[in-house]
Amino acid sequence: MSETNSMKLIIEAKSQNESFARSVVAAFFVQINPTLEQVEDIKTAVSEAVTNCIVHGYESAQKGLIEIECKLVDNTLSVEIKDYGKGIENVEQAMKPFYTTVSTGERSGMGFTVMQAFCDSVEVHSEQGQTTVKLTKKVA
């Protein structure tokens, strides 16, 4: 029989909540004894996903909600990060390295690339008014 646990966090889409979200997910993840490197990996990926919600989904308006749902099943963490912003017009294009819709500021267009580098899988589903990013990280 598989061991499971889950949690859900709802935060406002404010930049100061990004580090809180990252820390909460990491604290939940440690239940399955990941390495320190694996904890840092998931923290980095969650940071990128939450930042995408704030900057792109809600266009840096500092309002709106971000839902983060985590599930542990045996040795695997899955994290779904959802916003109710404008959506991604072309997910395939958005996931390409260096692609960004923000012409001002310090956006490198590497958010999804970073998530993919630090997770076992990254899935993105988007439509007008809702985007969900699912990150999966396995502990060997």
Image: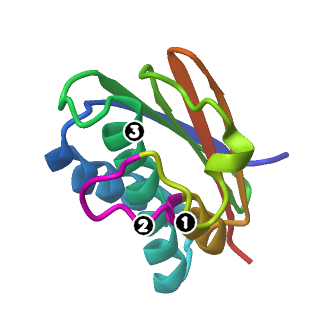
Badge 3: how crowded within 10 Å, few (<14), some, or many (20+)?
A: some
Q: Is residue 75 above or below residue 118?
A: above
| Residue interval drawn in magenta | 102-111
Q: Find numbered disc 3 in the image and state the secondary structure of the residue it sits on.
A: helix
Instruction: Verify CB contact (< 8 Å) between mark 1 and mark 2.
Output: yes
Name the spot of residue 106 as percent of width and height, x first: 28, 65
Name the spot of residue 62 as percent of width and height, x first: 18, 32
Point out the tag, 2 or 3, that comes first from the N-terminus. 3
Which residue has dot 2 on it? 108
- Residue 98: numbered disc: 1
Point out the tag, 1 or 2, that comes first from the N-terminus. 1
Which residue has dot 3 on it? 56
Examine the rendering and report whether any part of residue 72 can be seen: no
Residue shown at 35%/52% (left/top)?
103
> Is residue 103 within the magenta segment?
yes
Q: Main secondary structure of the magenta part?
A: loop
